[in-house]
Amino acid sequence: MGIKVKAKLKNGVVSVKSLAKHDMTTYNMMEKKTGNREDANFITHLTASVNGKVVLDASTSQFISKNPIVKFKFKGDFKKGDKVEMNWIDRKGNKDSGKGKIK
């Protein structure tokens, strides 16, 4: 799996675009496939931080697409070269992360 992260600084605003690789299986998909809704697995929490400061903290649900692309912007005392770190956790407790430098 993994998370790809790209970040750009322009006029004091950092724009982030990330790709979080995950199958994102919904309750309905798993009920049709295995007959058991509890086999569903999707990202439930997504966070992003720069230099240890949280800039995004989101709870998510089964209604996000497979391999979701997440875009967001933030302001702060950040500079080019700082690292943006993104993390997710899914319904089954699996975790993944990725980093990218602000350009």
Image (cartoon, rainbow, N blue to C red):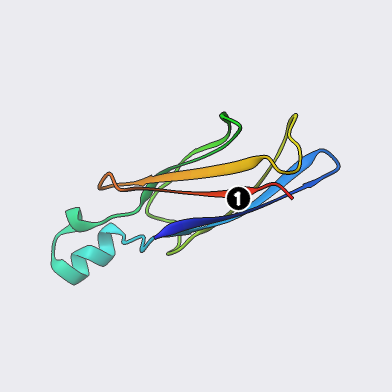
Q: Residue at the bottom extreme?
A: 33
Count of labels in the image: 1
- In which quadrant will I find the N terminus? bottom left
At horizontal 45% and vertical 63% (from top left) the residue drawn is 67
| Amino acid bearing label 1 | Gly
Depth check: give the residue in front, 32 or 23.
Answer: 23
Q: Is residue 59 left or right of residue 92?
A: right
Q: Position of residue 39 (x, y in %)?
A: 19, 57
At horizontal 78% and vertical 41% (from top left) the residue drawn is 13
Q: Is residue 96 left or right of residue 99?
A: left
Depth check: give the residue in front, 101 or 59.
Answer: 101
At horizontal 22% and vertical 64% (from top left) the residue drawn is 30
Depth check: give the residue in front, 102 or 34.
Answer: 102
Secondary structure state at the residue bearing disc 1: strand
Q: Position of residue 36 (x, y in %)?
A: 14, 60
Q: Position of residue 32 (x, y in %)?
A: 20, 70
Depth check: give the residue in front, 59 or 31.
Answer: 59
Q: Residue at the right extreme?
A: 11
Question: Circle 1 sits on which residue?
Answer: 100
Image: 63 above or below 72: below
Q: Quadrant of residue 53?
A: top right
Q: Residue at the front extreme?
A: 81
Q: Position of residue 69 (x, y in %)?
A: 55, 59
Q: Quadrant of residue 37?
A: bottom left
